[in-house]
Image: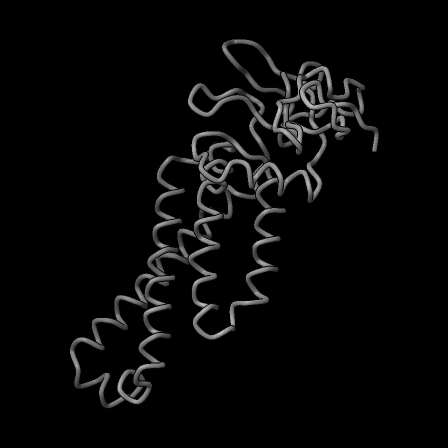
């Protein structure tokens, strides 16, 4: 891959990088390719409108997909940023990396439980940014993330209670005669159903392409240059 030098630190970086992986310096638009084979329209539609201006293949340029290292570097530098935008390659590379790491330690007693919380924290901000990039309705990110958090809470609590007294908490007679257990399992079931529903809705938007039109609240598209 052709490389350029970062204007700030002089490190060799990909000419398609959004920021320098070494110092975080934002790379200007002149670093991106301008050839016609890099021109593409959002979601294969013919045109878009921004402030009355028609956006077509001739004035919308596509930034090449981030590779694994670029995506992880960019995502890790923006862990506290929930107001910006993230393209699909950044989100899914980051999600895949956390999923692989998490699956390797999720079954370790006690320590394994905490991986769910860690993954949630690391996916929190990038999920907001990815949904901003589409854009998705504002209510989708919080409902999905908070229902998922509730599922984690109930799951970890259930597994902890199982280790404390598996006979009591997983006994059919106890479940039928103890009001607390009945309420617990009913709430757990409701939370799981809501999480599945909200996750399906969120997934629909998470797989969508970036919107090329700049958002006044969340900034320009990380994938398209107008």
| Colour setup of the view | one colour
Residue 209 percent location from the top left of the image: 59, 35
Is 46 above or below relative to 91? above
**Of 104 and 130, the residue lying toward us:** 104
**Residue extending farthest top:** 52
Residue 92 percent location from the top left of the image: 60, 46
Q: Residue 140's image quarter?
A: top left
- 192 sits to left or right of 16: left
Q: Residue 24's image quarter?
A: top right
Quarter of the image with the N terminus in it: top right
Residue placed at 37% from the left, 75% from the top? Answer: 159
Q: How many marks?
A: 0
**Of 39 and 11, the residue lying toward us:** 11
**Residue extending farthest front:** 9
Q: Residue 41's image quarter?
A: top right
Quarter of the image with the C terminus in it: top right
- 168 sits to left or right of 136: left
């Amino acid at each position: 891959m052709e490389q350029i030098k970062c204007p700030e630190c002089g490190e060799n970086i990909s000419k398609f990088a959004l920021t320098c992986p070494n110092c975080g310096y934002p790379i200007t638009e002149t670093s991106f390719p301008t050839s016609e084979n890099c021109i593409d329209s959002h979601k294969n539609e013919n045109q878009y409108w921004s402030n009355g201006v028609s956006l077509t293949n001739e004035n919308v340029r596509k930034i090449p997909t981030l590779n694994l290292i670029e995506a992880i570097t960019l995502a890790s530098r923006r862990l506290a940023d929930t107001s910006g935008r993230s393209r699909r390659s950044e989100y899914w590379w980051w999600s895949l990396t956390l999923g692989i790491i998490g699956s390797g330690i999720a079954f370790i007693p006690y320590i394994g439980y905490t991986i769910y919380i860690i993954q949630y924290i690391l996916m929190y901000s990038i999920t907001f940014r990815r949904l901003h990039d589409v854009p998705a309705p504002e209510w989708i990110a919080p409902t999905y993330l908070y229902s998922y958090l509730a599922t984690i809470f109930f799951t970890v609590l259930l597994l902890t209670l199982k280790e404390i007294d598996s006979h009591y908490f997983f006994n059919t007679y106890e479940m039928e005669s103890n009001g607390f257990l009945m309420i617990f399992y009913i709430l757990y079931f409701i939370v799981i159903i809501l999480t599945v529903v909200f996750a399906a809705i969120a997934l629909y938007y998470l797989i969508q392409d970036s919107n090329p039109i700049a958002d006044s609240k969340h900034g320009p598209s990380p994938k398209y240059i107008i």
